[in-house]
Image: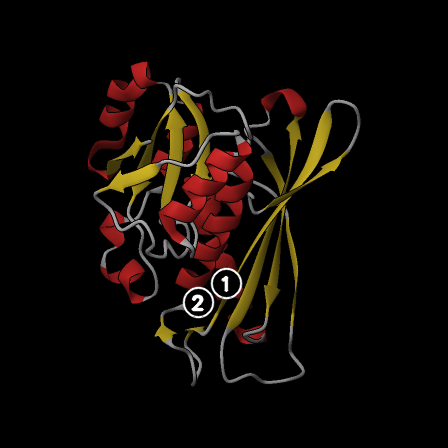
C-alpha cells in the first residue's frame, strides 16, 4: 500500500495526507547519524511531499512536529523551505514543538496535506504491458550525505511527474525496491514475477532517495534521456 491517506471532500476531489518521520538523526548526544537539522528537515519534507505529489495531489499545507527543541525550529524550517523552493511551492506551514521535556535523541515528524481530483489520481493505473525502472539509488543514513550526488534530485522528480508515458511513480522507502514493486504490482492486479535489477533490491532507500516508475515501453528513450545516469531498468521474468 502507498503511504498516503485519501479522504473524500466531494464528488470530484479528495483530501490527501502523507507523512514521514526521523529519529536518532541530528546533533543530539545519542543521535546515531550526526547531521545539521537543515538536512534532517530537508529530507523529511522531501519524503512527505514526494509521496503526496506522486499520487497526483497538489500540496496545500505542511505540518512540522518538532521534538528537538525550540532553538532548532528555524533550522528545521530552513530545510523545509529548501524543499519547497526546489519544487516551486509556496504553501503555509504550521506545527508544534516539545519544549517541556529535553530529549537525548532527535525526533521530527513531517506531514504534507494536499488535494487531488479523482480523474488525476495516479494509483492503480499501470497497464499489463508496462515496463518498470528505478530513478535514483537506494541510500540511507550516512550514505545520503556521503553520496548525495546519487540521490534523486527534486527538480528531476518534478519533471518525471509531467513526463509523457509514465503511469505511476512510487517513492522508495526503508523496505527497498522489491517491497515497493511488489506493492505496485498487487495494486494493479499483476502476478508475481522474478525481479532483476543492477541495484540492490532489498536495500533501504531511506528518505526516498530513489523512486520506482511504471511506464509505456515506447516512452523509454525519452525517460532515459531525462533521467540520465539515474535510470536503472527493472527486468521481470515469469
Figure label count: 2
Front-lying residue, 196 or 80: 196
In this rendering, the answer to whether 233 lies above or below 104 is: above
Q: Residue at x 38, y 46 (%)?
A: 178
- Colour scheme of the rendered structure: secondary structure
Q: Quadrant of the N terminus?
A: top right
In this rendering, the answer to whether 7 lies above or below 38 is: above
The outermost residue toward the front is 238
Front-lying residue, 161 or 84: 161
How many residues crowd mark 2 within 10 Å: few (<14), some (14–19), many (20+)?
many
In this rendering, the answer to whether 116 lies above or below 99 is: above
Asked if residue 88 shows in the view, the reply is no
Q: Which residue is mark 2?
A: 37
Q: Quadrant of the C terminus?
A: top left
The answer to whether the residue labelled 1 contacts the one labelled 2, judged by CB atoms less than 8 Å apart, is yes
How many residues crowd mark 1 within 10 Å: few (<14), some (14–19), many (20+)?
many
Dividing the picture into quadrants, the one containing residue 37 is: bottom left
The outermost residue toward the top is 218
Asked if residue 21 shows in the view, the reply is yes
Q: Residue at x 32, y 43 (%)?
A: 152
Residue 205: assigned label: none
Instruction: Name the secondary structure under disc 1.
Output: helix
Q: Position of residue 197 (x, y in %)?
A: 25, 41
Q: Position of residue 234 (x, y in %)?
A: 29, 35
Q: Which residue is mark 1?
A: 76
Q: Position of residue 54 (x, y in %)?
A: 50, 35
Of marks 1 and 2, which one's residue comes earlier in the chain? 2
Amino acid at each position: 500500500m502507498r503511504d498516503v491517506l485519501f479522504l473524500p471532500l466531494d464528488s470530484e476531489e479528495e483530501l490527501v495526507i502523507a507523512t514521514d518521520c526521523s529519529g536518532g538523526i541530528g546533533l543530539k548526544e545519542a543521535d546515531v547519524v550526526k547531521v545539521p537539522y537543515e538536512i534532517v528537515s530537508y529530507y523529511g519534507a522531501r519524503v512527505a511531499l514526494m509521496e503526496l505529489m506522486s499520487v497526483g495531489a497538489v500540496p496545500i499545507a505542511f505540518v512540522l512536529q518538532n521534538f528537538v527543541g525550540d532553538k532548532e525550529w528555524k533550522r528545521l524550517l530552513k530545510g523545509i523551505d529548501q524543499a519547497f523552493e526546489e519544487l516551486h511551492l509556496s504553501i503555509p506551514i504550521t506545527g508544534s514543538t516539545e519544549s517541556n521535556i529535553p530529549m537525548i535523541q532527535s525526533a521530527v515528524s513531517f506531514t504534507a496535506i494536499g488535494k487531488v481530483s479523482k480523474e488525476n489520481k495516479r494509483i492503480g493505473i499501470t497497464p499489463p504491458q508496462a515496463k518498470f525502472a528505478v530513478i535514483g539509488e537506494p541510500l540511507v543514513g550516512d550514505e545520503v550525505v556521503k553520496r548525495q550526488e546519487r540521490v534523486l534530485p527534486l527538480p528531476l522528480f518534478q519533471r518525471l511527474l509531467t513526463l509523457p508515458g509514465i503511469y505511476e511513480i512510487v517513492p522508495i522507502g526503508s523496505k527497498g525496491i522489491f517491497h515497493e514493486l511488489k506493492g505496485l504490482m498487487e495494486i494493479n492486479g499483476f502476478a508475481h514475477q522474478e525481479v532483476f535489477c543492477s541495484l540492490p533490491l532489498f536495500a533501504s532507500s531511506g528518505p526516498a532517495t530513489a523512486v520506482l516508475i511504471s511506464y509505456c515501453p515506447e516512452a523509454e528513450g525519452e525517460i532515459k534521456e531525462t533521467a540520465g545516469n539515474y535510470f536503472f531498468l527493472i527486468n521481470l521474468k515469469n
